[in-house]
């Protein structure tokens, strides 16, 4: 149709790959955050994971619950940020073709 390789990439290939890129970012964020908390539990002296593990060893269930809630809220907020970025950059997805 007369487009060069750069125009095809910028106007066709990259926009069509954006939904999968954002999905991959969400999956990578979840895996990374889980790994971070697990690493804090194993080899750190600070952080939410360490706090939860230390409180569990001290039978402080209130601190354990607060730590778990903070971890959950943090994960939800980070996921919502990526979803908002996807809605901004992938505005055509989910709209009717008609």
Image (tube, grey):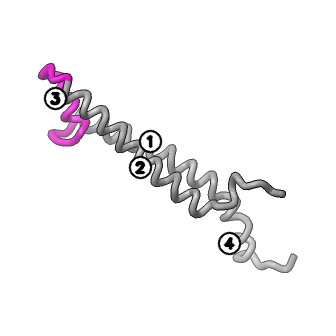
**Residue pointed to by mark 3:** 54
In the shown orientation, is residue 48 left or right of residue 84?
A: left
Give the SS element for disc 1.
helix
Measured Cα–Cα span from mark 4 to mark 2: 28 Å
**Residue pointed to by mark 4:** 10
Graded by Cα atoms within 10 Å as few (under 14), some (14 to 19) or many (20 or more), the crowding at tag 4 reads: few
Give the SS element for disc 2.
helix
Which residue is outermost to the right?
1
Q: Quadrant of the C terminus?
A: bottom right
Residue depicted at x 40% and y 44%: 32
Measured Cα–Cα span from mark 1 to mark 2: 9 Å
Which residue is outermost to the top?
59
**Residue pointed to by mark 1:** 30
| Vertical placement of residue 23 versus 54, above or below | below
Which residue is outermost to the left?
58
Q: Quadrant of residue 67?
A: top left
Q: Looking at the image, do the residues carrying marks 2 and 3 touch, with CB atoms under 8 Å apart?
A: no
Q: x, y percentage for residue 79?
A: 46, 47
Residue depicted at x 63% and y 60%: 90
Measured Cα–Cα span from mark 1 to mark 3: 23 Å
**Residue pointed to by mark 2:** 78
Q: Which is the main secondary structure of the residues drawn in magenta?
A: helix
Graded by Cα atoms within 10 Å as few (under 14), some (14 to 19) or many (20 or more), the crowding at tag 1 reads: some
- Looking at the image, tell me whether mark 2 or mark 3 is earlier in sequence order: 3
Q: x, y percentage for residue 75?
A: 39, 42
Give the SS element for disc 4.
helix
Q: Nearer the viewer, residue 81 or 22?
A: 81
Numbered range of the magenta stretch: 43-61
Give the SS element for disc 3.
helix
């Amino acid at each position: 149709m007369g487009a060069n390789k750069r125009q095809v990439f910028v106007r066709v290939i990259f926009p069509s790959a954006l939904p999968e890129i954002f999905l991959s970012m969400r999956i990578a964020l979840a895996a990374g955050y889980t790994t971070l908390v697990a690493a804090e539990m194993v080899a750190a002296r600070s952080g939410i994971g360490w706090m939860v593990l230390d409180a569990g060893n001290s039978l402080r269930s209130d601190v354990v619950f607060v730590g778990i809630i903070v971890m959950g809220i943090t994960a939800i907020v980070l996921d919502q940020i990526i979803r908002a970025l996807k809605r901004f950059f992938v505005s055509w997805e989910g709209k009717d073709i008609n």
